[in-house]
Image: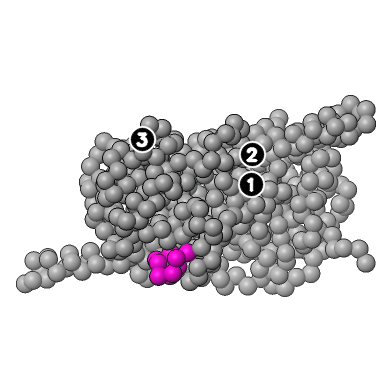
Amino acid sequence: MSAKRTKYLFTTGGVVSSIGKGLASASIGALLEARGLRVTFVKLDPYINVDPGTMSPYQHGEVYVTDDGAETDLDLGHYERFTVARLTRANNLTTGKIYQSVISKERRGEYLGATVQVIPHITDEIKSRLVEATEGVDVAIVEIGGTVGDIESLPFLEAVRQLKLELGVGNALSIHVTLVPWIGAAGELKTKPTQHSVKELREIGIQPDVLICRTEKPLSRSIKEKISLFSNVPAELVISAPDVDCIYALPETLHEQGIDELLCDRLNIWSRLPDLGPWKHIVERFLRPTQGTVRIAVVGKYVHLKDSYKSLHESLVHGAIDNDVRIDFQYVDSEALERDDAAKTLGDVDAILVPGGFGERGTEGKIAAIRYAREKGVPFFGICLGMQLAVVEFARHVAGIANANSAEFDPSAPAVIDLMPEQRNLRDKGATMRLGAYPCTLAPDTLAAQAYGSTEISERHRHRYEVNNDFRDQLVAKGLVLSGTSPDKRLVEMIELRNHPYFVGCQFHPELKSRPMAAHPLFTRFVRAALERARARTRSAVETSPVAHA
Ligand code: GLN
């Protein structure tokens, strides 16, 4: 018997970008998984960068890192958060990657004298990589980045068109995500942009099988029928995806309209009814937590663009769900903290998180926030650059190493954070950082070991600089606890402080592995520390209030 064949769902987007294709794809994956199916995902990105690692967060948002060290699109984060699929570098293809490999094959003479062209050579490369990345699962969800009509995405769409034909009826479906805007002046939902977008898709030979319509208000039956008439998609496959307060409500919203059953039906897949109990529980906890609210400050450079801290934000939400609290997020611009008094900005927060980052701008503001957290006993969590700056702050103000800094920012200062020898002579910027999963050993009797409930862990990295071993003894003598190191002890992976309610830093990115139903322990513990502080503050406010004393 031949191996089981993978079935495909191809997701495209129309009308506007950032329409939520990634979340829609991830939610469909979650529903199929809840029906007992094995799913995987591929994201096709039309830009010419080989990967998003060299792009600014302002251009691209977060760079999501996989276990095997690929720097990928943030949609892979959605896929991993919504399902148990574990993705690798094979699950994110870019135009740059495809051309790079076609051009190297051409240089090696592998095309045997042929003129190398978009069709068939580029499209064949896309198809073969897609098939390779999706072997062995029941359903592969392939999302094409950008918007239908972009010049850049044409080769990907053409490859999808060919593959759909080759796979045959019942083996592949096309899902088109569009916008149905509400025009207040007319008091109406407008279907014209969707009609045009479907027309454009059909012009390149792809008839959508399902439409997911992003809207402010649910689509009525008559609107669905109108869209159906113009788009040639049956009305029951015109699905509304209204804005949701909680992204984890999306699987249920789609399920209520029967999407998973309809997809399975058209893909000829027999599967059980899904149990959405765990998703409902998450949404209920998110919307109606019983333990109150904690205020958490995230002090960073990219706070104006929420996409740069996507996984981080979600991980805090997971930690909040786990503790049954709501987070009042305060995104604080670290540059502003260089001018303002930390006590004024951070005086009423229950915890402070300093995330990862690159470049000097705003670093002194982050250091001011860390100093405030350390001195005032405010729960602190430093991730990657956040941990490095916590070491700098400790070196300057506790260990007495004047002007201590990271070599990334001041090459002439005492570099408590520095490049490892293997990073010194690198000239390429792309994919040359310490990337992906590395093991870490935790010291027993530390907050870290307690949180993980284990002393052997593995976490994902994305950085060039490390704690400088020349300063280790000096820092440790002054009380810095090196709670995690590489198994050979050469690299510092985690730090913490005693005599502080909660002060933890890690060189890796735990936010890349947190899930709504399995919050990362470092986030759970951090939010719990914030909750304890919030409770203590309420108690002391009650005790000191005139009413309480009366
Ligand atoms: N810029 C620092 C480094 O390269 C930290 C990186 C990060 O926070 N991801 O080491």
Q: How many marks?
A: 3
Residue name at image x 35 percent, y 69 percent: 291
Label 3 secondary element: loop
Nearest to the eye among marks 3 and 2: give it. 3
- Relative to residue 113, is residue 332 depicted above or below? below
Question: Is residue 237 left or right of 537 when viewed as pictured?
Answer: right
Residue name at image x 24 percent, y 55 percent: 376
Which residues are the magenta region? 442-450
Q: Do the residues labelled 1 and 2 touch (CB within 8 Å)?
A: yes
Instruction: Inspect the magenta stretch and tell me whether residue 18 lies in it.
Output: no
The amino acid beneath tag 1 is: Ala
Relative depth, front residue between 494 and 430: 494
Nearest to the eye among marks 3 and 1: give it. 3
Is residue 550 something that shows in the picture? yes
- Tell me which numbered mark, 3 or 2, is placed earlier along the sequence: 2
Which corner quadrant holds the C terminus?
bottom left
Residue 163 — which label? Answer: none
Question: Is residue 530 left or right of 233 when viewed as pictured?
Answer: left
How far apart are the two marked residues, 3 and 2, measured between alpha carbons?
Answer: 33 Å
